[in-house]
Image: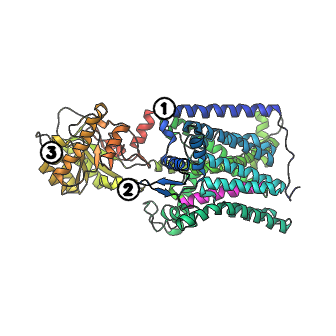
Amino acid sequence: MIWGIETHVRPKFDMRNKKYFLIVVGTAIVIKISLFLFASIHTPQSKFLPDSFEYLKTSEMLTSKGAFAVPDVSGSLRYELNRAPGYPFFLAILHGFMGISLNGIILIQILLTILAAFVTYKTAIRIDPKLGFLSAGIVLCSIVVSVFSLMILTETLFLFLMTLFMFEFVQYLKSGDVKALVMSSLMLVMATYVRPGSYFLGFVMVCFIVYANVSNNIKKTILHALVFLVVVYGLLGIWQVRNYMIFGNAAFSSIFQEDPLRIGLYKSYLRNTDPSTQKMGPISYYINVTWRCFLSIMTRPGSFKYLHWHALTIFGKVVGYPLVVFWMTGLVYGIAKAGRNVCYRFLSVVIIYFICGSIISEMWFVGERFRMPVVPFIAIISAYGWAEIIALVKRNKGPSRLTWENVKGVLIGGDQMKKIVKRLALTVFFISAVMAVGFVIWIQDQYVVPIMMYHSVSLADDNSSNVVDPGSFAKQMNYLKNNGYHVIPLDDYVEGNKARKKFPHKTVVITFDDGYSDNYKNAFPVLKGRHFPATIFLISDMVGVSENLLTWDQVKEMGQYGITFGSHTRHHVYLPEASEEEMKDEIVGSKRVIEEHLGKPVDYFAYPSGGFSERIKTITALAGYKAALTTNRGYDRYDIDLYELNRVHINNGDNRYTFWFKLSGYYNLFRKLRSSH
């Protein structure tokens, strides 16, 4: 007994265990490097999310100007308050001063995940020699850890530093060595400088130090708590002093002041716009939201969607969900069996801190990414849970010769085994229920507002897929009216996505391409009679040139009744095959022509035949369009590219059931899953 806590003798690492461990590590390295090579070749842009560019800008300023700032539009430096400085310094040192490429930094981050697994192994065997191998395996096999190590983001560095904090704090709990306590506090400081989400963990750990050692020397306990408090908040206070001197604000990061009030759980009931919870009372609302957010953090397996290969995304889910069931089963059983073991309680406290902190500060935006810092903590408790399950089964399995009679005798005759089966059945039921609820939440989260795409509304004889006859169109609009669909303007949809608004189900947008005259003759009276807004994309230089196309007088008349107009180029040119000069003329020129005739801004563009490229998107954005629409070539959710909005093609071949399915909000998801096979 050291510092009032039972310790274990360090186990010898026999060659058989070492062999298995090296096989697992080697396999994990091969998989991680393969993912890296695939991402580098197939989707080199996958290493970037919006935050990545902000970190790179700040690191460039640190390298060139020696200031934690970013340039504003005038070229002057704007000092940063919102972001913590740790990761930009990491990038500045490796990328700026040492000249390591971004791909090289990704490789270093992959190495950090492997080191995090090794540190998890060392921590686990410090607690119990049986836990090391499985704990490290859970970290190595985590899809969340693998995916985010491939991006220029804080997650991997934060994970590694939190793992070092875990190791040192367990060392302290096992030995009472103040040096380990100081090292753990330093690791926590470094982690907080990378991501400020761990800022308040220092206060929690001070309370835990007192709790863990309250039965021992009270003076030494208080001294240790004070040492931890002073080291953590003394070093974090340096940055707070800097912020106060520059901004007059002593907050460690402005995220503490803004995000919880804007998007977090705090006061969310008053600003709630979610149709499924708007009629709930405050208590029911907060229970509902907290539970759903908890499931979002804990049951999402991680996704390879950022690598933009559908088959790999599906594979990740097929493999990921069983892994979640595996470690969740161990976690639940481990927590139930941990008892008064102070190390497991420490791990549990950190897990609870990050879950609660994420839900409170982020609410609907939480997901598997917020679980990443506590994967090592989860891994050890889960390994302990499985060790207990295996030990329990071994104690009650009966004779060493495993026959059906022996198994039946144990199952029927052993009271202890009946308890085991009952407990395991309850565990399986609980995990299944959690996964089922998680799936329901996942599928709800896949809902997108369908943007309906029409062309001609006429009695054409050529059975074109771009034609809907007037009778069918009227029936479709009646279906929307009679079944409670909300038809919103395209502008409301785009602005809502910018504000990350969660649209209710049965919300749709109506659009037409090309500007056929039958849009005025056959579609407009139906839309007008039902007060449905719509957007028509005009080929600007072809308006009024034939009886099959709209005239400017018809366009202006429709504009008085909720119909808006966008651009579809000047001559319906397939842009990927056009020259740079022709692209600009078609995209910019059509906007100018329509605006001159209508006297109002044209904010939206539709790519002819759905053809676009990154360069075309850039030209479209620079031309002043708010968004651009393709045909039905993909699937949009949150964080969508507003210059690559996808649509659902409506045609004469749609019966009542296919029309309903296309408007369900899951049609493009189904198409995406089907096309990946």
**Which numbered marker is on residue 550?**
3
Q: Earlier in the sequence, mark 3 or mark 1?
A: 1
Magenta residues span 343-361
- Against 351, residue 35 (above or below) is above
Residue nearer the viewer, 591 or 467: 591
> Could you say where residue 89 lies in the image, as x and y percent from the top left?
59, 49
> Could you say where residue 41 lies in the image, as x and y percent from the top left?
50, 31
Q: Earlier in the sequence, mark 2 or mark 1?
A: 1
**Which numbered marker is on residue 496?**
2
> Could you say where residue 353 lies in the image, as x and y percent from the top left?
65, 59
> Could you say where residue 479 lies in the image, as x and y percent from the top left?
28, 51
Magenta region includes residue 347:
yes
The Cα–Cα distance between marks 2 and 3, rounded to whole angstroms, is: 30 Å
User: In this rendering, does residue 619 appear at all?
Assistant: yes
Q: Nearer the viewer, mark 3 or mark 1?
A: 1
User: In this rendering, does residue 487 appear at all?
Assistant: no
Disc 3 + disc 1, Cβ < 8 Å:
no
Query: What amino acid is labelled 2 in the image?
Result: Gly
Q: Where is mark 1, residue-wise?
A: 42
Q: Quadrant of residue 98?
A: top right
Magenta region includes residue 667:
no
Q: Residue 263 vs residue 374: left or right?
A: left
